[in-house]
Amino acid sequence: SMHAKARCGLRRSVRSSCKDGLGETTYSFLAAQESWRIHHLDVNSAFLTGELEEELYVKQPPGYIQEGEEHKVLKLHKALYGLRQAPQAWNVELDRTLISLGFEKAPLEHAMYKRGDGNDRLLVGIYVDDLLITGADEEVIANFKLQMKKLFKMTDLGLLSYYLGIEVQQKPEGIIICQEAYAKKVLESCGMKDCNPPRHRLSKKSEAPAVDATEYRSVVRKLRYLTNTRPDLAYSVGIVSRFMEAPTTEHWAAVENILRYIKGTTNFGCVYLRKKKKEMVELLGYSDSDMAGDVDDRKSTSGVAYFLGGSIVSWLSQKQKVVALSSREAEYIAAATAVCQGVCLGRLLGDLTGKEPEGVVFNIDDVSTISLWKNPVHHGRCKDIDMRHHYLRECVEESKIDINYICTDDQLADILTRSLGRQKFVKMRRRIGVQAVK
């Protein structure tokens, strides 16, 4: 391998890519909503184009060592693959190029760029060396492709159909994303075995025999990537991710249970339908929480889901960082996470579409949490809740969010916080938009 020495300290490597749950899903929704087509450009040998800001030297590679000067090193003028600085050098070069072409970086999503208004509107999403381009006018897109081809060696892959293991189908009625091929690859690499699903809660204190931790982590890492298009997997994969340190056969049985489910649903994904109406659709959010679901530390799990035009664009299933002392506090912590994400998502949509972001409609199934939000008189009853979560009340007072009460049966974030019975799980899966797409 190549060893680089910098006179100034080495920087961390940087690779541009859209945030999970925000970039790629929001991008797909906007394209579907506006009836735009997404194009795909690939930069050839992207890391070789970046200009280095530091002085870097490498040892003379085998076969190219000059006789009598073996002690000397080579000075680099361009980035090379294998350098820690190469990803950042490419990112800086691409950023500089797009800005020179009149693009503006989205302040809330640094891997997305915008240019122009109306029919000249152009959006570009960056995934390391892949450029995803969409806009109202195909001629504007074609001209941008020509501009980029003059500046970089690029391959025009036409309409987007596949990137980073995610399959994209662009149809007249909308856009579909799934990871069928990737799911099958995960199943093949794991080798499915016959075993009964675990019928008890998992714990780190399991007395079952240990399994190969490296293999366990590898499989769970693959499953986590699959959740990019499968919100129905977010909770279960989040649970098995908690036992990376010392997994046992009980934990591995849970992983196999997930794999068996995937085997029967490899062709499932998310659908983003085109709407006849062109006005900005409503951003609808849901949040939910279980209560002390983790048997080891008694922390609760937050579930958050956001929908645009009936299509899910952002989801989260995450163990809370503090122990909630009541179900109200657990719900409040989950809602605080959801509102922060909703406000950010609303601003991103407004920035990319050029329209003023509308308020976020937020649904929750806990009356006491809503009362705590709307009525300051209840403040004396919530001293146990960390003050940072009172950001929610400020959002309500400033009309950034509109809170609605819904019954538990309509709480779509429920699938992200707890294990559901088969019938309810299938029903919730269908309602959040995960379905067979092939």
Image (cartoon, grey):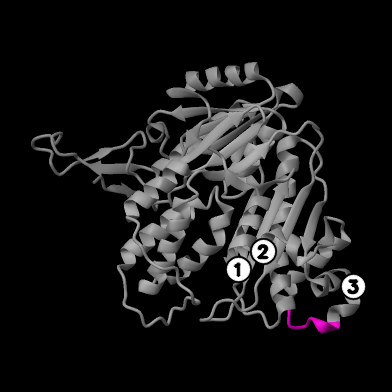
Residue 339 appears in view: no
Q: Dominant secondary structure of the magenta stretch?
A: loop
Mark seen at residue 414: 2
Disc 1 residue type (three-letter): Arg
Q: Position of residue 266 (x, y in %)?
A: 47, 47
For label 3, the residue is: 375
Seen from the viewer's position, the closer of residues 207 and 283 is 207
Mark 3 Cα shell of 10 Å, populated few (<14), some (14-19), many (≥20):
few
* Residue 126, above or below 373: above
Residue at position x 48%, y 74% in the image: 199
Q: Position of residue 70 (x, y in %)?
A: 12, 41
Which element type, helix, strand or loop, lies under badge 3? loop
Mark 1 Cα shell of 10 Å, populated few (<14), some (14-19), many (≥20):
many
Disc 2 residue type (three-letter): Asp
Residues under numbered marks 3 and 1 in contact, where contact means CB atoms less than 8 Å apart: no
Q: Label 3 vs label 2: CA separation?
A: 26 Å
Disc 3 vs disc 1: which is toward the camera? 1
| Residue 383 lies within the magenta run | yes
Residue at position x 68%, y 83% in the image: 325
Horizontal placement of 81 versus 112: left or right?
left
Q: Which residues are magenta?
A: 380-385
Residues under numbered marks 1 and 2 in contact, where contact means CB atoms less than 8 Å apart: yes
